[in-house]
Image: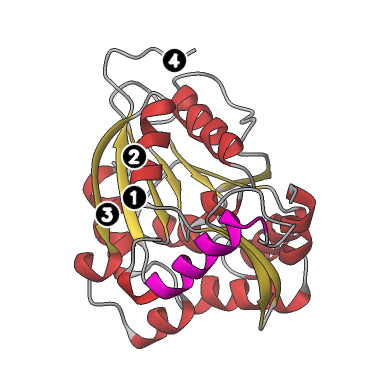
Amino acid sequence: MDSEAVKTYYRTPSVLDHYTRATTGIGLWLSERIAFTRYFSRRHPLLELGTGTGRIALALEGLGYEDITAIDLSEAMIGQALRIVESTKGSKVKFSVADACALPFADNFFEGAIFGFNGMMQIPGRQKRRTALREVRRVLKPGSHFIFTTHDRDNPHFRAYWAEQARLWASGKQDAHLEDFGDRYEETPLGMLFIHIPSRQEIREDIEAAGLRYESDTPRSLLANESATVREFADDCRFWIVRKSRDDIGE
């Protein structure tokens, strides 16, 4: 699995339309609003990774956040975000194409970062996901927070599925496209989607390996009672709150 397969999904017209409707019609989930406004100042520079068509960035700007940089690996998604801005009242969000594993920003620059809608889990390969975490740590100012979300392999509703996957991996019969246990690459109503479903232990290990400090993790369903529209758009996920140490000046 490589990043090109991921980008192919996000240039599909039906996917672009799906994300555009979420940007223009859904905006922030209640859980996102609770988490982001709790940890991020409206005046400080904020980085959103995996912005898609700008759902989170534009909604935060609407709440008064003044300095937002929003990136995505997909040229098609960023192009659509810019078209949304052009068709409305304009925006000061700085949209650009960039790779979360090689951020084009200076050390210790942002005072907050977000990787929403399980976006980091669409980076194929655990070491690449750890690279992305290290890059976020590098560009954050000491003491700043990073909030990201993941699905949860420990969810009891999917215990039977993962037990079967464990049996397939143990016998070497797993899907040949998959690199790590927890990977999924399968047909959805919008096309072939790659996503990694981690365990809580795995994410805790990755946070530590990247040199970030774990603060908390909470299922979305415990943060807020989301609307039916949001629940239809996205399944429950886990919010992770981590911080760059105050005495960490970066790399």
Q: CA distance from mark 1 to mark 3?
A: 19 Å
Residue found 49% across the figure and 12% down from its top: 251
Quadrant of the image occupied by residue 142? top left
Residue nearest the viewer, comparing 8 with 55: 8
Q: CA distance from mark 3 to mark 2?
A: 19 Å
Crowding at mark 2 (Cα within 10 Å: few <14, some 14-19, many 20+): some
Q: Which residue is mark 2?
A: 204
Gap in Å between the C-alphas at discs 2 and 4?
Answer: 20 Å
Is 223 on the left or on the right of 46, as rendered? left
Q: CA distance from mark 2 to mark 1?
A: 6 Å
Per the image, is 166 magenta?
A: yes
Q: Position of residue 249 (x, y in %)?
A: 39, 12
Amino acid bearing label 1: Arg
User: Of the residues under marks 4 and 3, which one precedes in the sequence?
Assistant: 3
Alpha carbon separation for disc pair 4 and 3? 25 Å
Q: Is residue 132 above or below residue 147?
A: above
Residue drawn at (53%, 70%) of the image: 23
Q: Which residue matches tag 4?
A: 250
Mark 3 is surrounded, within 10 Å at the Cα level, by few (under 14), some (14 to 19) or many (20 or more) other residues, namely some
Q: Is residue 15 above or below residue 1?
A: below
Q: Residues within 10 Å of mark 4 (few under 14, many from 20)?
A: some
Say which label, 1 or 3, has the lower sequence index: 3
What span is colored magenta in the figure? Answer: 159-172
Determine the CA span between mark 1 and mark 4.
26 Å
Residue occupying image coordinates x 53% and y 63%: 167
Amino acid type shown at disc 2: Arg
The answer to whether the residues at label 2 and label 1 have Cβ atoms under 8 Å apart is yes
Percent of width and height locating residue 170: 56, 55
The percent coordinates of residue 37 (x first, y second) are 26, 52
Q: Which residue is mark 3?
A: 35
Residue 200's mark?
1
